[in-house]
Amino acid sequence: MDPYPAYPHHQDDALGTAQGGTVRHPRWWERKGVRATALATLLAVSGVVIAALVREQTGTQGFLVGLGLAVVPVPLLTAAFRWLDRVRPGPWRNMIFAFAWGACAAALIAIVANSFATRWIETATADPTGADTLGATVIAPIVEESAKAAAVLLVFLFRRRDFDSVVDGIVIAGITATGFAFTENILYLGNAFGTDQLAGTGPGLSSVTAATFFVRVVMSPFAHPLFTVLTGIGFGVAAVTARDRGRFRRLLVPLTGLLCAMGMHAFWNGSSSLGEYGFFAVYAAFMVPVFGLVTWLAVYLRQRELRIVREELPAYVAAGWVTLPEPFALGSLKARRLAREFAAHYGGRQAAESVAAYEAYATSLALLRRRGSRGRAGADFVVRERELLDALWERRAAARPALAYGSRSAAPVWRPPVYAGPQMTQGPAYNPYRY
C-alpha cells in the first residue's frame, strides 16, 4: 500500500540542504546539546543565587516555613494550566523550562533590579516611603513582567513548532508566572514568619504569617499568572495571525500584551494605597472579573481548537491519511480519553503514549491546515504538513482501533426518519375525527 496516497514521491529539502546540494553543519554554539546545557547551567546558578538571597533576608527558619507554605498553590495552578493544554499538550521540557525560568532567573532579575531601583530613588529623593511606593507601583511591574515575558519570548523564538496558538501562549506564560509567584511567596511568607518571631506571636489566625498566607495563597494565587497571561495572549495572537504581516505588527501585538500586563500589575500593587478597603475593592471589582473573563477566553479557545479538528481533518479522510471516525474522536476530549484508556488496556503504556502522540500531531495538523486556508501558515507549510502526516502514519496501528472505539461517544448517531403520515394543516383546532 502506498503510504503517501495524496502526494507525489519526492525528497523534501528538510535536512539542512543548502543551495547547490551542500549540507550546512551547525556551528558548535548552534547545537541543541550546547544550548540546552548552557540554559540549564544558567537556571541552576540563578536558582542557587536566588535561594541564598531569600534565605539571607528571611533566615533559615523563615526560608523553610516560607518554602513549605509557598508550595501549596503550585500543584493546583500547574494542573489548571495542564488541563487547559489537554487538546494539544506541550512538551514537558517547555513546562519545566518556563517554571524554572520564573522561579529562578526571573525572580533573581526582579529582586536585584527592584532593590537597586528602590535604593537609587531613595537616595535621589531622600524619601524612603515615596521610594517604596514608586518602586511597588512603577518599577516592580515593569521589571517583573519583562523578566517573566522573556521566558515566553524564548519559547516563541526557539520552540516555534510548540507555540502556534493562543492557548500555548497562555499556558507558557501562566506556568512561568506560577514559578515566579512561588519564589516571591517564599520571600513574603518567610519575612512574615520572621516578624512573628520578633513580636513573639505564636502560630494562629492572628499572626502575620496567617494573614500573608490568606492574602497571597488563598485569595490571590492567580494574580501573577493573570498578569503574565496577558503577555502570553499577545504572543499567541502573533503566532496565529502575524505570519504574513510586517515586522512592526509582529512586534506590536506581543508588546501590547506586555504593556497590559504591566498596567494591570501596577494597578494591583497600587490598590493598597487607595485606603483601608482599597485592596478589597480592587480585588472584587477588577481582579475577579478580569480573571473570569480570561478563564472564559481560555476555555473558549480550547473548545475552538476541538472544533477546528472536527472541521479540518475530514479533508484527509478521502486521501487515506485518517479514517472516517477519527475527526469525531479527535474533536472530543471524552473520546480522546476513551481511546487512550482502550490503548492502555490492550496495548500497554507504550500504546497509550502512541495514541496520545497521535492526538497531539492530528491537532497540530488541523491547526496548520486552518492557518494555511487563511494564508497564514508560512513558507514551510508543505514540509510541516508532510512531517505531521508521516508522524500520524507511523502511529496508525495503535491509534486507529483506539480512536474507533473512542468515536462511539462522539460520532453523531444516525436515526432513520419516522414516517408519521400526511400532515393535516387546517389550523391548530383541527380534529380529523370531528366529522
Image (cartoon, rainbow, N blue to C red):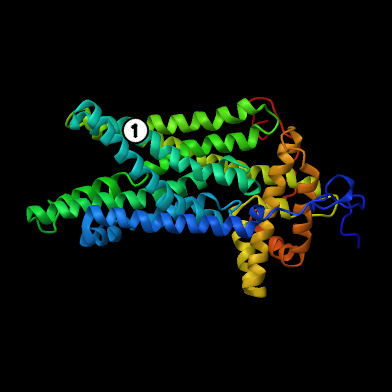
The answer to whether residue 282 is seen in the rendering is no
The residue depicted at 58 percent of the width and 53 percent of the height is 90
The x and y percentages for residue 89 are 58, 54
**Which residue does the numbered mark 1 point to in the structure image?**
139
Task: Please rate how many residues cluster around mark 1, counting C-alpha atoms within 10 Å: few if below 14, some from 14 to 19, many from 20.
Answer: many
Q: Which element carries disc 1, helix, strand or loop?
A: helix
Judging depth in this view, the residue of 92 and 6 nearest the camera is: 92
Rendering quarter of residue 138: top left
Name the image quarter holding the C terminus.
Answer: top right
The residue depicted at 59 percent of the width and 51 percent of the height is 87
The x and y percentages for residue 67 are 30, 59
The x and y percentages for residue 335 are 62, 57
The answer to whether residue 95 is seen in the rendering is yes
The amino acid beneath tag 1 is: Ile
The answer to whether residue 418 is above or below residue 234 is below
Counting labels gives 1
The x and y percentages for residue 382 are 81, 44
Q: Is residue 311 shown left or right of residue 278? A: right
Judging depth in this view, the residue of 348 and 96 nearest the camera is: 96
Rendering quarter of residue 246: top right
